[in-house]
Image (cartoon, helix red, strand yellow):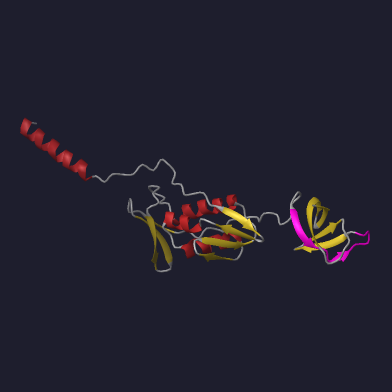
Amino acid sequence: MDTTSREGYIALLDRALKQIPTIADTTSRFAIPAPSVFIEGKTSIFENFGVIVDYINRDPDHLMKYLLRELGTAGRIEGSRAIFQGKFNPENIEKLLDSYLEEYVICSECGSPDTHLLKSGRITMLKCDACGAHRSILKRSRQKRIEKAPLVEVGGVYELKIEDIGSKGDGIARMDKYIFYIPYNKKGEVVKVRVKKISGTIVFTELV
């Protein structure tokens, strides 16, 4: 190959290399902000729900429907917060968010989160804006529902109303399925107690 031909070949090769799209490094796992969840009464408040929805660029109603289904509970969106009936730990929500990302956000080909959902007939497709790949959303078997945090725990402090007096003179109060025995016997009074022992649905307490 003469000098002129070689220079022409190199120029063509350089031009071809410049036209190859840059592939993003996907070795680092896409991460979202940690969910901020706290329990208020008998509900769980997902404080930064709106922040995470914006971060993953998904419809808030779509994510909320997924979470409610997997948690097996009812709930609603209030502003930028999600509210669930029942007590759920932040770890519960974080595991479900990871599953949601894997199913509805992350491209299975290049690992990019730059995707969007679209409908093809009755099938929901995930289209990647980074590499152009697309796949159908699999209707996977529902995960085992997340267990709710215990409603009553040893060491927990609760405010209860004495409804009855037991045969041994203890006050009796009730919460959900639990029956509390309280060392105080004035029916109708509201007292604050700490749980000492739980035996099935029977709860033994001390006054605080």
Horizontal placement of 100 versus 89: left or right? left
Instruction: Residue at 39%, 66% (x, y): give it.
Output: 119
Farthest right residue in view: 168
The answer to whether residue 10 is magenta is no
Instruction: Residue at 21%, 41% (x, y): give it.
Output: 17
* Vertical position of residue 40 compared to residue 29: above or below: below
Q: Classify the position of the N terminus by image quarter.
A: top left
The total number of labels drawn is 0
Q: Residue 148, located in which quarter of the rendered image?
A: bottom right
State whether residue 87 appears in this view.
yes
Start-end of magenta stretch:
157-169
Give whichever of 153, 15 is nearer the camera: 153
The answer to whether residue 163 is magenta is yes
Residue 133 image offset from top left, x and y in percent: 35, 53
Residue 70 image offset from top left, x and y in percent: 57, 59
Residue 109 image offset from top left, x and y in percent: 39, 49
Instruction: Residue at 34%, 44% (x, y): give it.
Output: 24
